[in-house]
Image (cartoon, helix red, strand yellow):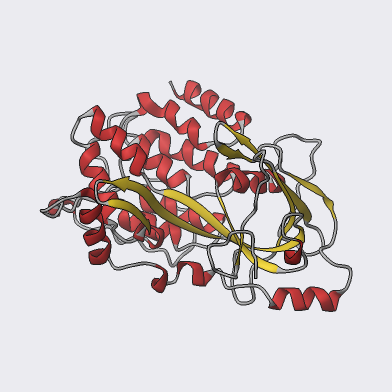
Amino acid sequence: MNNGGGGGDDRLWKPEVDKTGNGYAVLRFLPAPEGEDIPWAKVYSHAFQGPGGWYIENSLTTTGGKDPVSEHNRELWNSGNESDKDVVRKQKRKLSYYANIYVVKDPTNPQNEGGVFLYKFGKKIFDKIMESMQPEFEDETPINPFDFWQGANFKLKIVKKDGYWNYDKSEFDKVSPVLDDDDALEALWKKQYSLAAVTAPDQFKSYDDLKKRLDYVLGNKQPVRRVDEEVAEEDNSRGSYAPDFGARKEPVAAAPVSLGGCVNPVQDMGSIMAAIDDESFDDGKIIVAKQATSKKCLTVDQIKQIIDEFSFSKNKLNFAKYAYKRCYNPDDYYQVNGAFDFSSDKEEMNEFINDQN
């Protein structure tokens, strides 16, 4: 099967562009597969070149584990050398999404039309999905692009700019059913691929195997000291974090630390991020995030890391406001604006900060 360059995996659909660098297809995002809760999966990966060749691997941080590249990057970043920070920027992890799609139109590979595939995409397209579900303007009607009946086809438009594929012109069409026949819809649903399988343990190499590959790519003869990118090991005197998530209640906020006066920001974000990531839906994620940080001191980078776990802008903004008085370096809080997709959220956040000062 020619799936448009899916790398030999017949499950994957990948767009193709013409000689001018332009590409076009019409897709329909499908609901969560049978027995699963959400219609997409998230995978972090690293891809960079070193003296020993290319390192292209899925990151264990996807499932809340420690990853050797993340640890190595943390060590470089903390060196204080700007040149090391440049290396980290080139080696930082990349977030990709996977979803089931129904191919409505594929001019380059028409044999794919009417087929169900997995589609791997990045933040730009994911943002367009979120914008369709939560539009910025009052005169826009929200849609659920994953709904069989009330969703909409996605017109994928690719333009090559500065050597890269640009998706800015891509857009959702008007609301319409995927197919008019309910029996055909049921058959379509049963053809979908498991998204849980995308992040199953067999999709990731072991820490030791990844470490060996990293050392080879970097040309290291001695192993790099293990220091996690997102988290350094928590000081033994602080103890480990073991929150109670069973109650599922909105936490009562602890007495906030004085603005900018908290000391000793969290060193171990691993357990916190794993607990948040375990939640399938945004409402659960924000409850856990607040529970886990109610008595913590966080840096701006740590707050942004948590905000990135939320899909909906209202929850991003909610947590950003909540975390402000728990921030170790509030003078840098303007950086949190980079986590927002909409200018209205940035403006509201700035107004909130001004009201606090």
Q: What x and y, as percent, mark residue 356? A: 45, 24
Q: Does any portion of residue 52 appear in the rendered image?
A: yes
Along the viewing direction, whichever of 199 and 119 lies nearer the viewer = 119
The part of the image, by quadrant, that contains residue 305 is top left
Between 35 and 16, the one lying in front of the other is 16
- Residue with the most extreme left position: 222
Above-or-below relation of 345 to 296: above
Quarter of the rendering occupied by the C terminus: top left
Q: Could one spot residue 268 in this view of the protein?
A: no
The residue under the point 65% across, 51% down is 16
| Residue that appears at 50% across and 67% down | 198
Q: Is residue 302 left or right of residue 247?
A: left
Snapshot quadrant of residue 278: bottom left
Q: Position of residue 298 (x, y in %)?
A: 33, 40
Is 223 situated left or right of 214 in this image?
left
- Give the answer, above or below, for where 327 lies relative to 40: above
Q: In the displayed structure, does residue 292 sit left or right of residue 103?
A: left
Q: Nearer the viewer, residue 73 or 232?
A: 73
Total tally of numbered discs in the picture: 0
Q: Quadrant of residue 348?
A: top right
User: Picture coordinates of residue 2 (x, y %)?
Assistant: 65, 66
Residue 76, how many percent across, how many down?
Answer: 22, 39
